[in-house]
Image (cartoon, coloured by chain):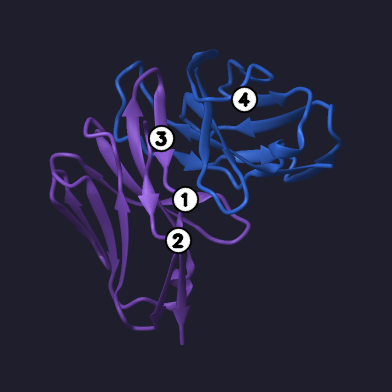
Amino acid sequence: GEDVEQSLFLSVREGDSSVINCTYTDSSSTYLYWYKQEPGAGLQLLTYIFSNMDMKQDQRLTVLLNKKDKHLSLRIADTQTGDSAIYFCAESMWDYGQNFVFGPGTRLSVLP
Amino acid sequence: ETGVTQSPTHLIKTRGQQVTLRCSSQSGHNTVSWYQQALGQGPQFIFQYYREEENGRGNFPPRFSGLQFPNYSSELNVNALELDDSALYLCASSPLAGDHPNTGELFFGEGSRLTVL
């Protein structure tokens, strides 16, 4: 069945790099996404990658996609305290309508 | 450009009651999706509306129903509320054109937090 998995917690020091990992199940997913959720707020899109790409870089964010292993990662360079949030990996399925399947989220804590 | 707005932001109901949640989509977006986010979990797809018709549904019972209006706003209705329905309900809009998705980015509102006692 459809399942997206992530580790639940990650702690880093301010200024270090953070790497958040995700595995997904559907090799037919067209796009894979990273969303950020701050306390009490909705989800905000950080970045996405098309399934025929291996890497995408956007300022401090680098997304790596290993389609063979169905593994997606998000690297945040020079992590700041404002990056503390929950990060969700999601895959887009086109079955009947456009259904996003989200992982459980990784809670990133940035320590000063 | 107005973003996705949801109302109410918080509400408390008791078991067996009915609830209606409302969503105004972002300007120019014709597709609305609803997600349920239980505490500590990722959002789960409930359904999607396009051109006032349901265009996809997740694994939720029929007591979860919805509507989309000509101005693309939407409602989520839940009948016979159960304790497990307590969650953050997120509405998301997207500029889905016809049946060919674009990058599929979803624009989320801040959610309606429902507590069922």
Closer to the eye: label 2 or 3? 2
Closer to the eye: label 3 or 4? 3
Q: Is residue B10 left or right of residue A88?
A: right
- How far across and how far down the image is residue B60, in percent? 58, 25
Which numbered marker is on residue A104? 1
Closer to the eye: label 1 or 3? 1
Q: Quick check: do tags 1 and 4 share a chain?
A: no
Q: Are marks 3 and 4 in contact (CB under 8 Å)?
A: no
Looking at the rendered structure, the secondary structure element under dot 1 is loop
- Graded by Cα atoms within 10 Å as few (under 14), some (14 to 19) or many (20 or more), the crowding at tag 3 reads many
Chain letter for the purple part: A
Which numbered marker is on residue B74? 4
Q: Are marks 2 and 3 in contact (CB under 8 Å)?
A: no
Relative to B24, residue A18 above or below: below
Q: CA distance from mark 2 to mark 4?
A: 32 Å
Q: Residue furthest bottom?
A: A112
Relative to A57, residue B106 above or below: above
Colour for chain B in the figure:
blue
Looking at the rendered structure, the secondary structure element under dot 4 is strand
- The subunit carrying tag 3 is A
- In this figure, which residue is indicated by the disc labeled 2? A8
- The subunit carrying tag 4 is B
Q: CA distance from mark 2 to mark 1?
A: 7 Å
Q: Nearer the viewer, residue A34 or B58?
A: B58
- Graded by Cα atoms within 10 Å as few (under 14), some (14 to 19) or many (20 or more), the crowding at tag 1 reads many
Q: Residue furthest front?
A: A1
Q: CA distance from mark 3 to mark 4?
A: 18 Å
Which numbered marker is on residue A36? none
Q: Are marks 1 and 4 in contact (CB under 8 Å)?
A: no
> Which amino acid is tagged 1?
Pro
Q: Nearer the viewer, residue A75 or B95?
A: A75
